[in-house]
Image: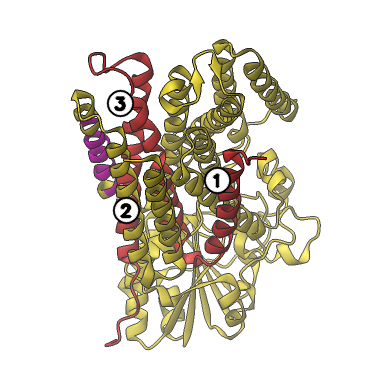
Chain colours: A red, B yellow
Amino acid sequence: MEIDPFIFRLSIFILSMFIGYYVVWSVTPSLHTPLMSVTNAISSVIIVGAIIAALAGSSENIFDNANIFGFLAIILAAVNIFGGFLVTQRMLAMYKKKKKDK
Amino acid sequence: MSANLLAVFYLISGILFILALRGLSSPETSRQGNLFGIIGMAIAIGVTFLSVGNFSTGFLYVLGFLVIGGSIGAFIAYKIPMTAMPELVAGFHSLVGLAAVFVAISAFLNPEVFNLGLPGNIKISSLIEMSLGVAIGAITFTGSIIAFLKLRGIMSGSPITFTGQNYLNLSLGLILFGLIFYLCKTQIDTWFWTIIVISFLVGVLLIIPIGGADMPVVISMLNSYSGWAAAGIGFTLENTALIITGALVGSSGAILSYIMCKGMNRSFFNVILGGFGGTDQSQSKTDKEQKPVKSGNADDAAFLMKNASSVIIVPGYGMAVAQAQHALREMVDALKKNGVKVTYAIHPVAGRMPGHMNVLLAEANVPYDEVFELEEINNDFANCDVVYVIGANDVTNPVAKTDPQSPIYGMPILDVEKSKSILFVKRSLSPGYAGIDNDLFYKDNTLMLFADAKKMTEDIIKSL
C-alpha cells in the first residue's frame, strides 16, 4: 500500500496551522498591525506559482493567454511583497523603548 | 535543480516565514523577524527561477514585471501615512486575493505546466483544490475592495442590509459548492468562470452589511481568507512554501478575528451577519438632551492635568481621524515636565484594525513600554487622578457592565469611570458607533471638551 503524496501535503498543512496557532498567540497585541502587514507580504509567496505560469510554454509567444495571467499575478504579488515587507519595516522601526536618560 | 532539492528550499523559506512571525512576540526581535521573512521570500523566488531554468526573453519580462510591481509597492510603503494603515492592509489583501485568482486561472488554462494533467482532463483532486483556491481568492478580492472603500470613506461606513440577505448569501454559497462539484464532474470551463463570478459577488455581499467599527474583525477575517486562498493554490501547485504560509496566515487571521470578537463580546457570526450599529438610534436620542453636561475648555483641562499626579490617556478612532497623535505626545511631554506620571490604555478594538492605536502612538514616538493593554492597566484607573479620553467612546461606556439590555452588554471596557476625574474630548454629544448613549458624559466628575481632538490637544499644550 502506498500513501498518496496529498496526505503528506495535508500533514504539512495541518501541522503548520498548529505552529501558526501557537506562534500567533505569542505575538504581542501592540504588534498586531505589523503582524497583518507581514502576513500579507508572506502570503504573496504565491508569486512562485505566477512565475512558473508566466514562463510556461514557448519563448516565441510570451504573452499567450495562459501566460498573461501569470504576468498579471507577478505584478500584483510583487506590489504586495515589496509594499508589505517595507511598510512592516517602517512600522517596526518606530517602536522604541523609553530613553534611559529621561 | 532537482525537484527534491527545490522542495527542501521551499521548506526553508516556510521555516523562515514562521520565524518572521515568531519575531513579533516582542518589538526588540521583530525587526530581525522581518528580515527572516525577506530572506525566505528571496529564497523562494530565487529557486523558482533556477528551477524553471529558462533564461530566455520571457525571463527578462518576468524580471521587468517584478521590478514594476516592486517599485509600486515600495513607493506606496514609503508614502502611506500611518493613519491610512487599515486601508492599506485591506488593499494589499485584495491584491493577494486577485493574484490567487490569476494563478488558478493560468493553472486551469495550462495544467500541463504544473503537472496537473491536460486541459479538459485535469486531475480531480487538483481541480477541487484549484476551485477552492480560486473561490476564496475571489471572495478575498472583492471583499477587501469593499472594506477598502469603507475604510477610505469612499463608501459609507454604515451597514447596507436588505431582506433575505442572509438567505441569498447562503444559497450563493450552496451554488458555489454545486458548481465545484459539476466542474469536477464535467471539466467544462464555463463552470470554472461561473465559480469566479459568483465568488466575486459573494465577497461584495459578505462585507456590505458590516459597519465601520466592526472593521477590525473584517480585516482580520480577510487576512485569514487570503491565507486559505494561498494554501488552496499551494495544494494545487504542490508547493510546500505556499502550503506552510497559507496555513500560517490563515490561522493568524482567524486568531485575530477571535481576539477582536472577544474584545466586543460578540460572536463571529453576529459580526458577519452584520447590521450592528445601524440607524435605529431613535429611542436613545429622545431623552438625552435634557441631562445636564459639564463642559470645559482647554485651560480647565490643562489645570486639572497639571495638578494631577497620574494621568491615563485613552485613545480611540477619533484620534486617528483627527491625526492627533503627535499633538498628544507633545502634551504628554509637557505634563511629564510637570512631574505627572502618564500612561496610555488601549482597548483591543480601539481603531479600525488590530493594533491600530499602538502603531499611531509609536509613530508619534511614544515609547511602547508606556502603552498598556486593557488587562494590564484596568486596575490602575481607580488610583488615577485624570483620564484623558481622546476619540474613544463605546469602549469606556459603563453600560456594558450595568445594563443587560444594552447591545454592548458584556463587552470588556476600560474602567474609566473609576478615575477621580474624566476629560472627554469629543466633537459633540452624539452617541458612539453602537448608537447608545454614554453615561459617563453626565457624571459629576466628567468634563466634556467639545472640539476637534487635535485642536483641543494643541490648545491644552498652549495653556500648560
- Kind of residue at disc 2: Ile
Residue placed most toward the observer, B173 or B332: B173
Q: Tell me where residue B288 appears, x and y as whole percent.
A: 68, 54
- Kind of residue at disc 3: Leu
Residue B224 numbered mark, or none: 1
* Label 3 sits on residue: A55
* Label 2 sits on residue: B38
Residue placed most toward the observer, B61 or B419: B61
Q: Are marks 2 and 1 on the same chain?
A: yes
Is label 1 or label 3 in front? Answer: 3
Determine if residue B213 is in view.
no
Magenta-drawn segment: B64-77
Residue at mark 2 to residue at mark 3: CA–CA distance: 23 Å
Secondary structure character of the magenta stretch overall? helix
Quick check: B172 left or right of B200? right
Q: Tell me where residue B327 appears, x and y as whole percent.
A: 33, 65
Residue placed most toward the observer, A45 or B77: A45
Residue B340 numbered mark, or none: none
Is label 2 or label 3 in front? Answer: 3
Residue placed most toward the observer, B420 or B276: B276
